[in-house]
């Protein structure tokens, strides 16, 4: 069986490597991806059409906004799936989690405690910057949300899971994850209510103090905030389910 | 992109990939997988795909390494095969 697998791996590898020579060079202006007029349109027209300097964010959140919305839904569904597999107690037992005696509390380590106390606010501030500045510089909702969730994971690692759950209890996590998708789709439905297509942000200038082109930029910031909500919540939810073996009590 | 930097990163990428598949200790395999993600992030940044590099460093090297380590500490540390 092992030799059969080796033959299959070698054959697949040979096939993939034999296709490498047909690739266009890195940064080749004549390659099919760069030659087609659509990429020219994105490069030259993104800023005049959307007033967003970061082309990647403009394509992700505006031109392909439908894609990104359902990517967020995929993250949401993944978090819910992990929770439904690993979670062991019903949600009703969690209401007075903060008042419960901490039987699993670890002895605080001075160095780890002080370092994390200093680092976590800076990480969170950086995450907020990444979200808020995502349409001007690299970053955006996904990255900022993951970094924000990672700051709570760091808190849970440095102390215990209860310390992090004081800030993001399980109920709030689920609410945040849903609210994120609601914000994103709310922008889409607001466009529909004003008489335009789903996620066609230009029409939102009627309810925003902005020109139609600036309305696209502001709406992109709005949907990125929605993505960041979902990512933050789901990242912490996955970690707390994995680390506590599903009962939200013990830490690693 | 500087070719020497590129070459060194790619060689380390292959080495970390092989080590993380071959090692029996799953905790170190998870750590080396994080190193693999970080090298991949350097490659993306070298190719001027900064958004992708950002995502790779946040999700690949940061959070998914923590997820893997949490899973290893909750299951078994030694690989049987």
Image: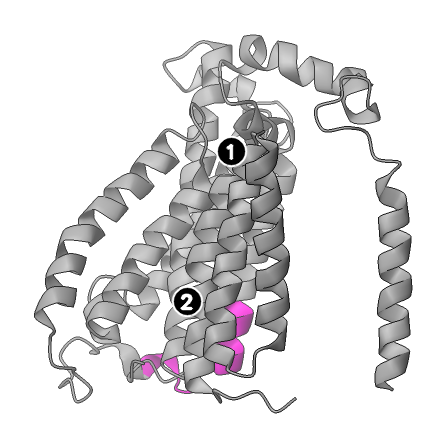
Query: Which residue corresponds to the image point at 37% horizontal and 72% vertical from the top-left?
Result: A240
Q: Give the secondary structure at mark 2.
A: helix
Residue B35, given in percent of the width and then of the height, sits at 48, 58
From where the camera sits, is residue A179 visible?
no
Query: Which residue corresponds to the image point at 62% horizontal and 48% vertical from the top-left?
Result: B10
User: Residue A88 lies in magenta, yes or no?
Assistant: yes
Q: How is the image coloured?
A: one colour
Q: Nearer the viewer, residue A242 or A180?
A: A242
Say which quadrant the N terminus of chain A sits in.
Answer: bottom right
Q: Which residues are magenta?
A: A80-92
Badge 2: few (under 14), some or many (20 or more) residues near its Cα, within 10 Å?
many
From where the camera sits, is residue A118 visible?
yes
Residue A205, given in percent of the width and then of the height, sits at 46, 16
In terms of image quadrants, where is residue A174?
bottom left
Q: Nearer the viewer, residue B8 or A101?
A: B8
Q: Chain of mark 2?
A: B
Disc number for residue A227:
none
Residue A150 appears left or right of B13: left
Say which residue label 1 marks.
Answer: B50
Residue B41, given in percent of the width and then of the height, sits at 52, 45
Residue B78 appears left or right of A243: right
Query: Which residue corresponds to the image point at 35% horizontal and 32% vertical from the top-left?
Result: A132
Say which residue label 2 marks.
Answer: B66
Q: Give the secondary structure at mark 1.
A: helix
A180 vs A44: above or below:
below
User: Residue A21 lies in magenta, yes or no?
Assistant: no
């Amino acid at each position: 069986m092992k030799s059969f697998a080796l033959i299959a791996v070698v054959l697949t590898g040979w096939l993939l490597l034999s296709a490498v020579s047909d690739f266009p060079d890195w940064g080749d202006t004549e390659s099919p991806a760069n030659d087609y007029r659509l990429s020219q349109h994105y490069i030259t027209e993104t800023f005049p059409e959307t007033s967003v300097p970061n082309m990647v964010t403009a394509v992700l959140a505006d031109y392909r906004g439908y894609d990104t919305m359902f990517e967020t839904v995929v993250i949401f569904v993944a978090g819910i799936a992990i929770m439904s597999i690993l979670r062991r107690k019903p949600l009703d037992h969690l209401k007075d989690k903060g008042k419960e005696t901490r039987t699993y509390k670890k002895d605080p380590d001075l160095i780890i405690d002080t370092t994390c106390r200093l680092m976590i606010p800076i990480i969170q501030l950086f995450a907020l910057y990444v979200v808020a500045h995502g349409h001007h510089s690299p970053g955006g909702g996904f990255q900022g949300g993951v970094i924000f969730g990672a700051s709570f994971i760091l808190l849970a690692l440095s102390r215990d899971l209860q310390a992090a759950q004081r800030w993001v209890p399980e109920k709030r996590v689920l609410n945040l994850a849903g609210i994120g998708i609601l914000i994103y789709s709310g922008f889409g439905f607001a466009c529909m209510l004003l008489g335009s297509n789903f996620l066609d942000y230009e029409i939102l200038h009627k309810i925003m103090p902005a020109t139609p082109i600036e309305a696209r930029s502001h709406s992109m910031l709005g949907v990125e905030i929605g993505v960041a909500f979902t990512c933050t919540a789901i990242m912490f939810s996955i970690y707390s389910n994995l680390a506590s073996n599903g009962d939200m009590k013990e830490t690693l | 992109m500087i070719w020497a930097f590129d070459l060194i990163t790619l060689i380390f990428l292959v080495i970390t990939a092989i080590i993380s598949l071959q090692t029996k200790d799953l905790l170190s395999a998870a750590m080396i997988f994080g190193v693999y993600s970080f090298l991949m992030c350097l490659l993306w940044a070298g190719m001027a795909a900064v958004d992708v590099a950002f995502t790779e460093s946040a999700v690949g090297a940061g959070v998914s390494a923590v997820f893997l380590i949490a899973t290893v500490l909750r299951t078994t540390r030694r690989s049987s095969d």
